[in-house]
Image (tube, grey):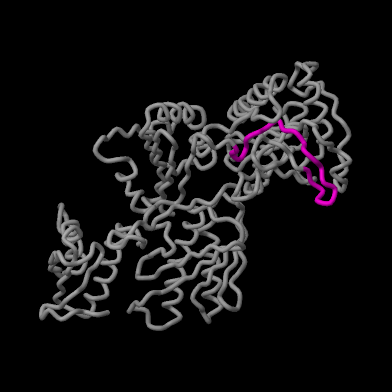
């Protein structure tokens, strides 16, 4: 197994913090935390029931958002009555012990019951955000609370102990179950996360105590809290991203903000002291942190409608109201593969890896339909399907992939908990008042791509471009032109042309005939 090199690059500005996750230098996730975001997944609110609706078997709940949140009966949790009694007692100041040790539980609610039997208007209830507000919908919430830690998740008003399905070793499952049962406080359930595999009692105990203290701090707020208001915020995004994605494969965390750097260092000290040294404070004044790691460029080239891949292949990504559609194209390529099937297979494999990255990068959710290039060999279809599954195995969002249909379509459903990352990559056209163009940075990729094709059939190539682009191609050491020379063993003559528009370029042969591909 080759080692994967994962890095987290964090950029802080006055209005937002950006997190970029790189895998072997390629951008695979992008998160943005804005100060104003009040409804993050995991936040707990004390909220007011506005109105239960029997026909929907759900209640609309006022959580302080302009749109009411939606709470379905199945998301109430079996011990809702106990939770409501607890809130009542704590809010009135009659209950000072928040540990649930001596708390008398109520009877569980009927799992096939109706919302109007258990909830009434104006009632106060503790709810947790499970889906952030997306476009016209308010947040989706649940009354079954859970507090996520590094190794375990604490579930108040429950007694269940469950172990992550991803831990396959039966012995290890039993060990963790016994261990957790011995340290678990009464009145709380525990879910053991995958990363707890092989961890000892002290580490799990520490995690548990940390979560219990968060629970106590939340309960202390209840007597004085305004209804509706947030009573427990998720950790800051840096810590919550680290909690969920951090593992031993990380080789570096670069941060350009001193305060955030110290917070992250402290958090790693808690969860993985041996890795504390990989956190670095980035101080260069000359090159912004996202430029240094080539992230800005990758954003520009990865978020458009068309996504270029190696060997001339490209993807077209379209979004409709109901679903996302991804089309795989092989581009006009003369390649070494002997027949159509091999070409299709090669392009499909490149596309599958890129699609897995795109889904994470854009955080696309709902139904995704991919139109791969048709392959007649069923064996190849199976290889492609297994490869796509493997590429998506790192994806934290719940997803399901169906095998390719007869038409070569693959359907994926992917859970969506926050709005999709959409970055505008088109820019104003400098040659036209009202038009838009692809980001200029992509022009270099296009020239490189076209040059490859031209050099297959022509020995001496002259490239005519706008003076700015000409300067970009020839400046620095090694310049882009020198890199082309090393790759193709042919020197490309570049002529700056004042008459050209900014993004115009043409190839000529040495007799000054235009090369039209």
Give the quarter of the image for residue 44: top right
The residue lying at 30 percent from left, 57 percent from top is 441
Does the magenta-highlighted stretch encompass residue 441? no
Between 41 and 216, the residue placed more toward the observer is 41
The quarter of the rendered structure image containing the C terminus is bottom left
Q: Is residue 32 above or below residue 388?
A: above
Nearer to us in this view, 443 or 249: 443
Front-most of residues 232 and 467: 467
| Residue depicted at 43% across the width and 46% down the height | 21
Q: Which quadrant of the view contains residue 264?
A: top left
Left-right relation of 60 to 471:
right
Residue 179 in view, yes or no: no
Query: Which region shows up in magenta?
Result: 39-59
- Is 133 above or below relative to 469? above
Q: Is 189 positioned to the left or the right of 85 in the image?
A: left
Residue at the left extreme? 511
Percent of width and height locating residue 80:
81, 35
Quarter assignment of residue 196: top right
Q: Position of residue 230 (x, y in %)?
A: 64, 30
| Closer to the camera in the image, 96 or 389 | 96
Q: Left or right: where does residue 469 sit relative to residue 204?
A: left
Identity of the residue furthest to the front in this view: 433
Q: How many marks?
A: 0
Percent x, y of residue 256: 35, 34
Q: Is residue 290 visible?
A: yes
**Picture coordinates of residue 386, whole percent (x, y):** 55, 65
Residue at (12%, 79%) from the top-left corner? Answer: 512
**Which residue lies at the image location 67% right of the left edge and 43% below the top edge?**
67
Residue farthest to the bottom, as pictured: 339
């Amino acid at each position: 197994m080759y080692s994967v090199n994962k890095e987290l690059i964090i950029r802080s500005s006055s209005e937002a913090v950006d997190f970029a996750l790189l895998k072997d230098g390629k951008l695979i996730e992008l998160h943005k935390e804005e100060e104003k975001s009040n409804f993050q997944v995991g936040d707990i609110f004390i909220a007011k029931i506005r109105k239960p609706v029997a026909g929907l078997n759900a209640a609309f709940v006022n959580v302080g958002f302009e749109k009411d949140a939606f709470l379905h009966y199945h998301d109430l949790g079996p011990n809702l009555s106990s939770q409501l009694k607890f809130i009542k007692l704590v809010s009135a100041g009659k209950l000072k012990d928040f540990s649930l040790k001596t708390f008398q539980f109520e009877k569980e609610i009927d799992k096939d019951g109706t919302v109007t039997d258990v909830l009434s208007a104006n009632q106060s209830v503790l709810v947790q955000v499970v889906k952030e507000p997306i476009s016209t919908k308010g947040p989706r919430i649940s009354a079954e609370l859970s507090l996520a830690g590094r190794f375990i998740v604490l579930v108040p008003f429950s007694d269940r102990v469950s172990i992550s399905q991803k831990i396959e070793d039966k012995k290890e499952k039993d060990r963790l179950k016994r261990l957790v049962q011995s340290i678990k406080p009464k009145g709380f359930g525990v879910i053991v996360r995958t990363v707890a595999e092989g961890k000892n009692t002290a580490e799990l105990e520490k995690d548990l105590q940390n979560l219990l203290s968060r629970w106590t701090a939340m309960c202390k707020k209840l007597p004085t809290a305004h209804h509706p208001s947030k009573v427990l915020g998720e950790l800051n995004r840096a810590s919550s991203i680290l909690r969920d994605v951090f593992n031993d494969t990380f080789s570096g965390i670069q941060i350009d903000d001193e305060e955030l750097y110290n917070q992250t260092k402290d958090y790693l000290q808690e969860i993985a002291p041996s890795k504390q040294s990989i956190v670095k404070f980035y101080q260069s004044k000359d090159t912004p942190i996202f430029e240094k790691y080539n992230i800005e460029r990758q954003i520009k080239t990865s978020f458009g409608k068309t996504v270029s891949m190696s060997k001339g292949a490209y993807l077209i990504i379209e979004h409709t109201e109901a679903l996302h559609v991804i089309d795989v194209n092989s581009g006009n390529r003369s390649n070494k593969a002997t027949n159509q099937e091999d070409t299709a297979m090669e392009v499909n494999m490149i596309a599958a890896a890129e699609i897995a990255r795109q889904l994470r990068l854009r955080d696309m959710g709902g139904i995704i339909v991919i139109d791969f290039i048709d392959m007649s060999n069923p064996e190849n279809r199976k290889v492609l399907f297994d490869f796509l599954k493997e590429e998506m195995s790192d994806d934290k969002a719940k997803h399901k992939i169906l095998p390719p249909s007869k038409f070569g379509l693959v359907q994926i459903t992917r859970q969506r908990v926050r709005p999709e990352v959409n970055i505008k990559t088109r820019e104003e056209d400098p040659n036209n008042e009202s038009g838009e163009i692809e980001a200029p940075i992509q022009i270099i990729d296009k020239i490189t791509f076209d040059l490859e094709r031209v050099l297959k059939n022509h020995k001496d190539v002259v490239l005519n471009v706008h003076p700015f682009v000409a300067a970009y191609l020839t400046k620095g050491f090694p310049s882009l032109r020198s890199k082309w020379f090393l790759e193709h063993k042919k020197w490309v003559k570049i002529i700056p042309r004042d008459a050209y528009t900014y993004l115009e370029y043409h190839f000529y042969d040495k007799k000054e005939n235009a090369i039209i591909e």
